[in-house]
């Protein structure tokens, strides 16, 4: 008991950590979704924010992170554009990225309004756009591997975001 009182503070920390581990496990191992579990665990333990925050803050954090990664990659695509003979293809990817980014950036408003269906739609729109861009990139010579790799990561992060929003939508624990 004395030990308990003295260790009270760290016990609280351990509990937070334990809850976090349980939650990560439940999000990252969802079987009905196509989740990249290793990336999921990696991202969810990446920062103190993700470890401590509640689910709505966590998804907000992931959306911000995703938005930054998509706009960074968009900048890279624009740089590549002047460097390739396949300008048309790069332009196509650019527009797909812009479309994805617009949806991602609109989604926090829908979340705040508890319109989970729309928030899900806004984020899930990233899937077809990234897949189409990856298909386009794969026809280029040489294939800009950096861009397709980043697009695959963006798909994986979208998967994690959509799993969490899906829990909100169905009103279940995640
Ligand atoms: C999961 O993500 C990691 C990191 O981006 C990547 O190396 C790995 O290939 C991905 N796994 C699958 C099955 O897509
Ligand atoms: C553009 O092409 C040059 C020469 O192949 C290369 O060194 C450079 O990294 C390329 N820039 C981008 C943004 O891909
Ligand atoms: C998972 C992933 O690729 N994250 C990247 C998001 O963007 C930042 C900034 O460009 C990179 O440092 C991360 O690696």
Image (tube, rainbow, N blue to C red):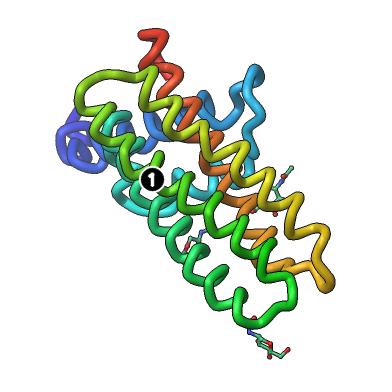
Task: Specify whether residue 130 is in view.
Answer: yes
Name the residue at the front extreme: 88
- Name the residue carrying label 1: 102
Q: Nearer the viewer, residue 164 or 43?
A: 164
Q: Position of residue 88 (x, y in %)?
A: 67, 64
The answer to which quarter of the image holds residue 80 is bottom right
Q: Can you give x and y, in whole percent of width and height, for residue 68 in the image?
A: 39, 58
The image position of residue 134, as x and y in percent, is 71, 52
State the quadrant of the N terminus: top left
User: Is 51 rendered above or below residue 148?
Assistant: above
Against 124, residue 73 (above or below) is below
The reply, left or right, for residue 18 in relation to residue 124 is: left
| Front-most of residues 164 and 77 | 77
Say which quarter of the image contains residue 87: bottom right
Total numbered labels placed on residues in the image:
1
The residue positioned 48% from the left and 45% from the top of the image is 100
Residue at 43% over, 53% down: 46
Ligand 3 within 8 angstroms of badge 1 C-beta: no
Is residue 31 or residue 9 the one in the foreground?
31
The reply, left or right, for residue 51 in relation to residue 164 is: left
Identify the image quadrant of the C terminus. top left
Q: Locate residue 155 relative to residue 167 in the image: left or right.
A: right
Taking the spot 31% from the left edge, 51% from the top edge, the residue there is 48
Q: Is residue 11 visible?
A: no
Residue 6 appears in which quarter of the rendering? top left
Is label 1 in a helix, a strand or a loop?
Answer: helix
């Amino acid at each position: 008991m004395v030990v308990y009182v003295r260790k009270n503070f760290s016990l609280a920390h351990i509990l937070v950590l334990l809850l976090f581990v349980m939650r990560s496990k439940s999000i990252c191992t969802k079987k009905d979704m196509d989740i990249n579990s290793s990336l999921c665990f990696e991202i969810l333990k990446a920062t103190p924010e993700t470890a401590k925050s509640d689910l709505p803050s966590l998804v907000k954090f992931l959306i911000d992170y995703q938005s930054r990664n998509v706009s960074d990659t968009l900048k890279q695509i624009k740089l590549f554009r002047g460097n390739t003979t396949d300008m048309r293809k790069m332009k196509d990817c650019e527009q797909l990225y812009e479309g994805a980014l617009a949806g991602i950036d609109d989604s926090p408003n829908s979340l705040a309004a508890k319109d989970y269906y729309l928030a899900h739609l806004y984020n899930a729109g990233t899937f077809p756009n990234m897949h189409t861009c990856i298909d386009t990139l794969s026809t280029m010579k040489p294939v800009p591997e950096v861009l397709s790799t980043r697009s695959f990561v963006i798909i994986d992060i979208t998967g994690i975001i959509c799993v969490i929003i899906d829990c909100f939508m169905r009103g279940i624990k995640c």
